[in-house]
Image: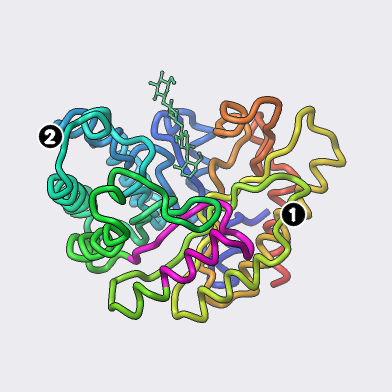
Amino acid sequence: GRALSDAAASTGRFAGTAVAADRLDDPTYARIAATQFSSITPENAMKWESVEPERGDFNWTDADRIADFADANEQDLYGHVLVWHSQLPAWLNEGDFSPSDIRTIMTDHIATVAGRYKGRVDRWDVVNEAFNEDGTFRETIFHNAMGEDYIAEAFRAAHRADPDAKLFINDYNTDGLGPKSDATYRLAKKLLAEGVPIHGVGVQGHLVLGQQPEDMKANLQRFADLGLDVVVTELDIRMELPVTRKKLLRQAVEYKAVTDACTAVARCEGITVWGFSDADSWVPGWFEGEGAACPYDEEYKPKPAYYAMKLAYTVA
Ligand code: G3I
C-alpha cells in the first residue's frame, strides 16, 4: 500500500515521527522512518544536555546524523527543543548564575543551536512545557531569572538565528480545552499582539486510551483563528498492558479521531508520532504496566492505529 506520508500529503499535511539517532543503524527502523514519514523530529538529539553536556563543549554527532537523514530523504526537519526545563545539562542546572547570566546563556544557546541548523529546520519547538496544569507559569531557571519575558526573548533569539524557520510553543495536556491550553492561548495572543515572532502552537498528544479529549478540534481551531499554524507534535496513545485485540481497535479509533481533528482544521500542518514503534517508545520506561502506544508493534508491523491514520487522511 501507499505510505502514510502520501496519504497525509493528499490533504496537504505531513506525517512525522520522532527518531532516535542510534536506532538508525537498524535497517528496518531506518527504512520505515525514511519511507512512511515526511517529517523527522529528533527525540533527544537536539536537547541541551545532548548538544552541550559540558559548558562550551558541543557534541553534534547525533543531531547532525538526524538532520542529514532528513535531508537525504527529502523530509521536513522539526527541531526539538531550544528552551525546556528538562534535560538541561548539569553545568547549567547546578551552576551559580545571576539572572543576567541566565538570559545570556539562554540566548547564546538558541543562537548556537538554531544557527547551526539555519535553513534546514522547517519548524522549531522554541519553548516547551512553559505551564503548570492550572495554567500558571512553570517555575524554571528561565522563569526565575526573567519572569515570563523569557518566552518572548527566546522567540526573538530563534528568529534572529533562523529567520525562515516556523517557531512553535509546545506543551502536553493542551490537546483539548482546559486551563493549560487556555493559558497557552492567552500567551500566544499576547505574543502576537506584541509582534513576537511566533508562528505555531504544538500540542504534544501524549494520550491515554479511553481518555480522549473530545474538544481537540475546537482547541486547534482557536489557535488557528489567531493566525497560527498548529501541529500535533508527539502523538502516542498508551494503554494498560497486556495488549488485547479490542484495545488495539479502540486505539485505532482514537488515532483516527486525532487525525480527523487535524484534517478538520485548515491550519493543522500535520501529526508527528513520538516514535513509530512500540519497540522504541518512551512509554514503558515511564509508566509502569503501560505501553503499546505507537502505530507499529514491537516487530515493526503496522497496527490497526497505522491503518486508521492512513484511512483518516484518505477520506478527509
Ligand atoms: O542516553 C542515556 C544512556 O546513555 C543511559 O545509559 C540511560 C540510562 O538512564 O539513559 C539514556 O538517556 C535517556 C534518554 O531518554 C535516551 O534514551 C534518559 O535517561 C531519559 O530520561 C530520556 O528520556 C526522554 C525524555 O523525553 C526525557 O525527558 C525520552 O527518550 C523522550 O521520549 C522524552 O521526550 C519528551 C519530549 O522531549 C517532550 N515532551 C514529552 C516527551 C515524553 O516525555
From the viewer's side, name the closer residue of 278 and 6: 278
What residue is shown with label 1?
A: 254
Residue 56: assigned label: 2
Query: Quadrant location of ligand 1?
Result: top left
Q: For numbered disc 1, what is the local secondary structure?
A: helix
Q: Is residue 304 left or right of residue 282?
A: right
- Residue at 61%, 55% (x, y): give it: 4
- Residue at 20%, 60% (x, y): give it: 157
Place residue 10 in its image quadrant: bottom right
Is residue 83 depicted above or below 45 in this figure? Answer: below
Tell me the crowding category of disc 1: few under 14, some 14 to 19, or many 20 or more residues within 10 angstroms, Cα based: many
Q: Is residue 285 magenta?
A: no
Q: Quadrant of the C terminus?
A: bottom right
Residue 36, visible in the rendered structure = no
Position in image of residue 125 (x %, y %): 38, 55
Q: Which residues are magenta?
A: 166-188
Which amino acid type is shown beneath numbered disc 2? Gly
| Marks 2, 1: nearer the viewer | 2
From the viewer's side, name the closer residue of 32 and 86: 86
Q: Could you tell which of marks 2 and 1 lies nearer the N-terminus? A: 2
Position in image of residue 20 (x %, y %): 44, 35
From the viewer's side, name the closer residue of 85 and 132: 132
